[in-house]
Amino acid sequence: MSEETEILKQTVIADELPKASLADKLKEQKKAKGKKTRKRVIIWGFLLLFSYAFWWLSKPFKATATYGICKSFLELYVPYPHTIHVSEIKPQRDGSLKLWFIHVGAFGEYRMESFQCKLVNNPDTGVLELTQLKLHKVQISSERVKYLNNALPYFVENPLVLNWPTKLPDSLNDLHFDFDRVRKIIINPDK
């Protein structure tokens, strides 16, 4: 029996904790408050990082001014410029820029063609100068190119649309063109 009482005494003593002093309680409260603050900082930091990454990934990437000028000249040569969808930009070895684009033809068919333009810095004036235009396989005359050079100062004064074009999908099943979805909805056509 004495062994049992001895064991009970040891367990009772082990279960009894000394009462915490006021300083210990304040330390515990301070420690809990610090943990809570750290947790909030980590959560807000993660949310800010996630929102910045989402913003960065959702903004359109910008192309060069050469692309914007070439696309503007392309819109002059396509019969229905609002149907143009540039799918790829390829810089060429001779310094020109080749745009592959799709547009709707005169009979409603989708046509994929290329447009190549070459802009060179003039060493005398330091201004961009158009030297060559090519629509699909047709070379645009040099007289016409000279006339288009007169429009280049306009591009310096007015901002260009430089959003990087989206590539077309590789699968034919994924290739859908719905140009009607961006048109304005007319509720009452009589007004």
Image: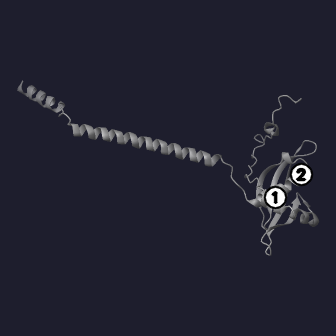
- Circle 2: residue type: Val
Give the camera-side residue of 95 and 67.
67
How is the protein colored in the picture?
one colour
Q: Position of residue 125 (x, y in %)?
A: 80, 73
Q: Position of residue 66 (x, y in %)?
A: 77, 61
Q: Position of residue 77 (x, y in %)?
A: 90, 54
Residue at 84% x, 46% y: name it.
82
- Residue position marked by numbered label 1 in the rendering: 70
| Figure quadrant of the N terminus | top left
CB contact under 8 Å: marks 2 and 1:
no
Give the camera-side residue of 178 and 47.
47
Query: In this rendering, does residue 4 appear at all?
Result: yes
Name the secondary structure under disc 1: helix
Q: Is residue 73 above or below residue 186?
A: below
Give the camera-side residue of 69 and 188.
188
Q: Which mark is residue 137?
A: none
Q: Is residue 5 above or below residue 121?
A: above
Q: Is residue 168 above or below residue 117?
A: above
Residue at 47% x, 41% y: name it.
43
Query: In this rendering, does residue 98 appear at all?
Result: no
Q: Residues within 10 Å of mark 1 (few under 14, many from 20)?
A: many
First in residue order: circle 2 vs circle 1 = 1
Name the secondary structure under disc 2: loop
Q: Residues within 10 Å of mark 2 (few under 14, many from 20)?
A: some
| Figure quadrant of the C terminus | top right
Q: Is residue 44 left or right of residue 105?
A: left
Q: Is residue 153 above or below residue 84?
A: below
- Circle 1: residue type: Cys
- Residue position marked by numbered label 2 in the rendering: 78
Residue at 18% x, 33% y: name it.
19
Spatial CA span between label 2 and label 1: 13 Å
Q: Is residue 49 left or right of residue 130?
A: left
